[in-house]
Image (cartoon, grey):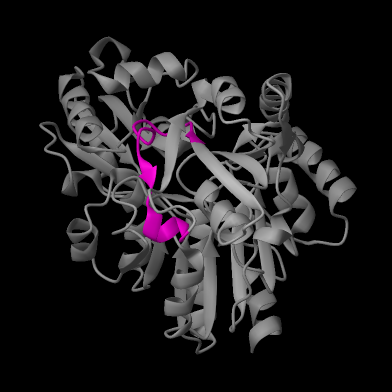
Amino acid sequence: MGKRVLIMGAAGKDFHVFNTLFRGRPDVRVEAFTAAQIPGIDGRVYPGPLAGAAYPDGIPIEPESRLEELVRDRRVDEVVFAYSDVSYAYVEERRRRAESAGAAFLTPDPRALMLRASCPVVAVCAVRTGCGKSQTSRRVLRALRDLGKRVVAIRHPMPYGDLLRQRVQRFATLADLEAQHCTIEEMEEYEPHLLNRAVVFAGVDYQAILAEAEKEADVIVWDGGNNDTPFFRPDVHITLVDPHRPGHEISYYPGRENLELADVIVFNKMDSARPEDVRVVEANVKRHNPTAQVVYARSPIHVEEPERIEGRRVVVVEDGTTLTHGGMQFGAGILAARKYGAREIVDPRPFLVGSLADTFRTYRDIGTLIPAMGYGAAQVRDLEATINRVECDAVVIATPVDLRRILRISKPCVRVTYELDDYSQPDLGEILRRRFA
């Protein structure tokens, strides 16, 4: 039988770990995946056609709460931790659980998970969710296009539906998002690229995804998820740090690995960061990656019809994963509400519906704003119902996707957007010109 393995995941990196490290190996038997972080992803099966001939019935995906039971019942030799944006204390607690049940525990070497592309790769990663990867990826795409390069984006996986159908996904238009039944979480990442006229690939099997993307690209931009490490070996590895969360760059997994592997480190949100917090992050960068090129950037906000905010009672809707996995308590929407003189930022908690109430119970520090949770149709309905129940004059929408296209909101809405302004020299454009011109 060989070594028995269990992979702890969250419907993304876990599948990539299996595909790159274990698929096709006769000396290893993967007994199960466990699922965490994302609601509704357990109870499925990683399909046999994806898993390979050794797994004709596929591989079960179990809730992480069953970790010890699975280790004992399946006589697991090794537990592999394969999801992102958790503290090192959290990882160590999982280590203790696995070892107490009788299994070894490891986190995979990120380099072993990096596939080699036939064209150059620029990876955009971060030390935490919500640092600003999306606008940085768009900035990188524009800079490479200005150099005359054909560029496609490959996004970190979010396969929350039919895994066989999601093996290789290609998005070129907004209609593709609807045709492939994307969740809000997926649309938040794909739609800004599509509006920027970029093709996006994503899915489950990143070797197959890479083969398709290489047909269309001179350069690939890896648009990372959460604070995960790249799935492709980068020629330029860009990592964002967030001075709003000083110290997190070295205390969260695997964000610290991104910090240590980076060629370029971008200090984002300098327009709203406290100088003393910037100094803490600078000291940690110098200690852990003293040779990296440092770029400083702002994230200026653009607000359409700001007069709808002034003097009004508003409820703010922000990116869901930034508030949950990322632990942030404010974002561009809160900054816009304060800047343009909202009379009150209404607390949505008395108006929560269904799964959103569950989200607030799980993530107790979210505060007085609404995370745009949308992992499935039920969550989308609950999000819409909650927004419409809140007693306010206007809704400030600061999500990467325009929720007005997805939800029927009964109140006036104000959209907040933001782009990266890398102002130090050399900026990202110059760094990429030196590498690829």
- Chief SS of the magenta region: loop
Give whichever of 337, 25 is nearer the camera. 25
Give whichever of 87, 294 is nearer the camera. 87
81 sits left or right of 43 in the view: right
Residue drawn at x 64%, y 54% is 229
Give whichever of 98, 88 is nearer the camera. 98
Is residue 216 visible in this depiction of the protein? yes
Give whichever of 394, 193 is nearer the camera. 193
Q: Is residue 9 above or below residue 350?
A: below
Residue drawn at x 72%, y 71% is 426
Q: Position of residue 232 (x, y in %)?
A: 61, 67
Is residue 140 visible in this depiction of the protein? no
Count of numbered tags: 0
Q: Quick check: is 41 in the magenta stretch?
A: yes
Q: Position of residue 403 (x, y in %)?
A: 23, 44
75 sits left or right of 102 in the view: left
Q: Quick check: is 47 in the magenta stretch?
A: yes
Q: Position of residue 245 (x, y in %)?
A: 65, 33
Residue drawn at x 16%, y 25% is 385
- What range is drawn magenta here? 34-53
Could you tell me which quadrant the C terminus lies in? Answer: bottom right
Residue 278 occupies which quadrant of the picture?
Answer: top right
99 sits left or right of 310 in the view: right
Q: Position of residue 405 (x, y in %)?
A: 17, 49
